Amino acid sequence: MIDIVNYEERQIQIIGLANRVADELLRALAARGRATLVVPGGTTSPDFLRELSTKRLVWEKIDTFVCADQFVPESDARSNVGMVRRELLQNHAAKCNLHSFWSAYNSAQDQALKLGRSIEQHLPIDVCVLGMGLDMHTASLLPGAKDLQTALRDEERRNVVCIEAANCATPRLTLTAPSLRRARNLHLLITGRAKRMALGRALKINSVKQAPIKAVMQVDNPLNVHFAA
């Protein structure tokens, strides 16, 4: 189930989503004393993260994770955690509790298991914001990737999986579809006609393996799609 919110322009989209996420985090903090936030990587998210950093919240009580990352140090330009640290951890969000995916001492597989165990205490996610690729992937749930099925199935009961794909130079760690779609508030941030068309294709495809974004549409609460051309 999806609920599409259309914005006249991208700046209005960014402000609208940041305001909504801030309100949801505020309610989570009031209800439970802490909150869990999941944010996307990619090129669409920096503007959103910078806007979100201006919101007055008790950021030291907000545990923040990226939905997926390449298994590289944060200093690497490919690191989503590194990008989030630069873009979000400023202004009022300077004290945000951002969790790293990288370890110099573990393999990618071992780090996925360790991170999956440690994230358990922060679930279910209070607010989850995702992006989507033109190939209809979200997080690092990549069509055709090794271990994709493991990352899609509830039966595995794993929160983080190591994903390897033919076109990826390094392994990726990704939150699994079950951990993402159980979020109390679930959002998808997309821009441009090409992404809107890709979402339309995903809605018509029956196979989650071909269109992994469908894995987070199969929820009781709606996937809130925030779109600007």
Image: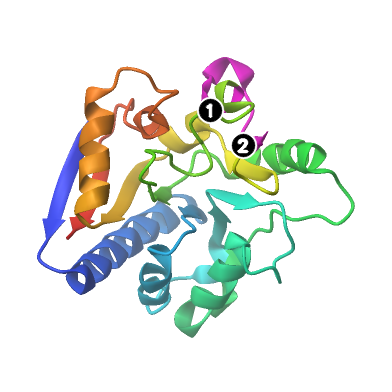
The reply to whether discs 2 and 1 touch (Cβ–Cβ < 8 Å) is yes
Q: Residues within 10 Å of mark 1 (few under 14, many from 20)?
A: some
Q: Residue at x 60, y 22 (%)?
A: 150
Q: Which mark is first along the chain, 1 or 2?
A: 1
For this view, does 70 lie left or right of residue 6? Answer: right
Q: Residue at x 23, y 57 (%)?
A: 192
Q: Nearer the viewer, residue 5 or 206?
A: 206
Q: Nearer the viewer, residue 59 or 29?
A: 59
For this view, does 159 lie left or right of residue 203? Answer: right
Q: Which residues are magenta?
A: 150-165
Mark 1 lies on residue: 144
Dot 2 amino acid type: Ala
Q: Which mark is residue 165?
A: 2
Q: Picture coordinates of residue 107 (x, y %)?
A: 84, 43
Task: State whether residue 225 appears in this view.
Answer: no
Helix or strand or loop: what does disc 1 sit on? Answer: loop
Q: Residue at x 53, y 19 (%)?
A: 154
Dot 1 amino acid type: Gly
- Kindly report the distance in space between the C-alpha atoms of the residues bearing marks 2 and 1: 7 Å
The quarter holding residue 190 reads: bottom left
